[in-house]
Amino acid sequence: MRIAHVSDVALPRVGGIEMHVDGLVVRQRAAGHDVEVVTAFGGNGRPWQRARPSAIARTSDEVRAGAFDVVHVHSSVFSPLALGVAAATSHAGIPTVVTAHSLVSRYEPVLRALDAVTRWTRWPVAWTAVSDLAAAPLRRLVGDGTPVSVLPNAIDVDHWRVEPTPRDPDHVVIAAVMRLAARKRPMALLRALRLARASVPDYLALRAVIVGDGPQRGRLERYCARYEMRDWVQFTGALSHDTIRRLYRRADVFVNPATLESFGIAALEARAAGLPVVAMRHSGVSAFVAHGRSGLLVDGNLTLADAVAALATDARMRERMAAHNRRVVPSLDWSRALELVEHAYTSAGAVHDARRTQRAGRRVVTAKAGP
């Protein structure tokens, strides 16, 4: 199959969409497909990527000229290139899949107004999203029984499974992996860590390791200096997967403070490594973290701090959850994801065929009604 993935962003920029698209392409190419990525920003991370930042029309022409069997569009909240290409290729008769990678609930009024002009909810595409949480607002928007299937992100589960190292129950290591940007709420994480540290006994040694980089790093480091947290909170910058795996062998808890998390790949990796996960209840993490069994799901900043403190002070609860996570392997691996993607491509072909049949029927009716 000849497949084009279209995304406004791609490697070497690092994020959820970028990593998922790259992982998907690697495995599709290994399966024998002819795959290419067309992007607006990036294009230097892999030899199969082409950067086309100039215009939607030019990119659409490039994709159409490639005679692809299917176009897979990856959309965030603001993805003018990807969605512009989806409009062009779907109406040009190329089977097109659109995957929503972000939560758009807060933008529903804007998207409804945009629909009045562009009629995007009537494009002949197969609509998908990375989680049920991300699919829900899209289902409300497209309406009329139009299906929106779930194409979850995926990881190499076996790669992330690690053997934990011996540990002192009174020395707790808390891990977080995220882009240090406001949307991921790293400041909420620091505030929760500060409150947790104040509420646990003094004999308990806490260490927090925050992996990742981003525009808020300076502000976060200043916060740690102001509240004397630098001796137990470490910022490592971006790390390789192998280095993060080594961290997970010694870590006791993983924390994801994001509220606008449509999926949560880093949390899934930590869950596969056996770490109890603390995350927000109304986020995509809830798709693979069961409250009380594989982690703790919370509703706000104060309960986030309470959950971190509870796991820090209760070694038995930590070990029970860690044992569960090591024993019950997440089902969100690449083999399952590839099956779902191929089903979506088949659905896109069906949408295309139905649209073509509908147009042919209209032409027949028009011809019969003629003079």
Image (tube, helix red, strand yellow):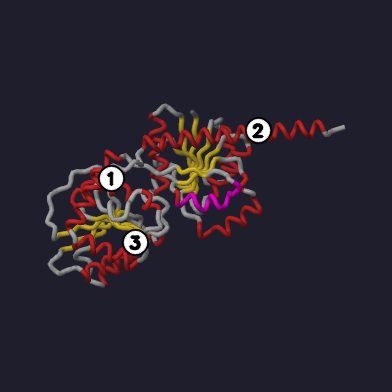
Q: Quadrant of the C terminus?
A: top right
Task: Mark 1 vs mark 3: give the one in front.
Answer: 3
How much space separates mark 1 and mark 3, taking CA atoms? Answer: 20 Å
Q: Label 1 is placed on what type of residue?
A: Ala
Q: Is residue 334 left or right of residue 138?
A: left
Toward the viewer: 117 or 216?
117
The residue where tag 3 is placed is 298
Q: Is 135 included in the stretch rendered in magenta?
A: yes
State the residue at coordinates (53%, 30%): 69
Q: Quadrant of residue 351?
A: top right
Toward the viewer: 267 or 218?
267
Toward the viewer: 81 or 351?
351
How much space separates mark 1 and mark 2, taking CA atoms? Answer: 44 Å
Q: Label 2 is placed on what type of residue?
A: Arg
Q: Secondary structure at mark 3?
A: strand
The residue where tag 1 is placed is 272
The boundaries of the magenta stretch are 133-144
State the residue at coordinates (30%, 57%): 296
State the residue at coordinates (56%, 35%): 95
The residue where tag 2 is placed is 356
Q: Label 3 is placed on what type of residue?
A: Val
Q: Position of residue 261 (x, y in %)?
A: 40, 55
Task: Mark 2 vs mark 3: give the one in front.
Answer: 3
- Which mark is first along the chain, 2 or 1? 1
Q: Residues within 10 Å of mark 1 (few under 14, many from 20)?
A: many
Q: Position of residue 254 (x, y in %)?
A: 27, 55
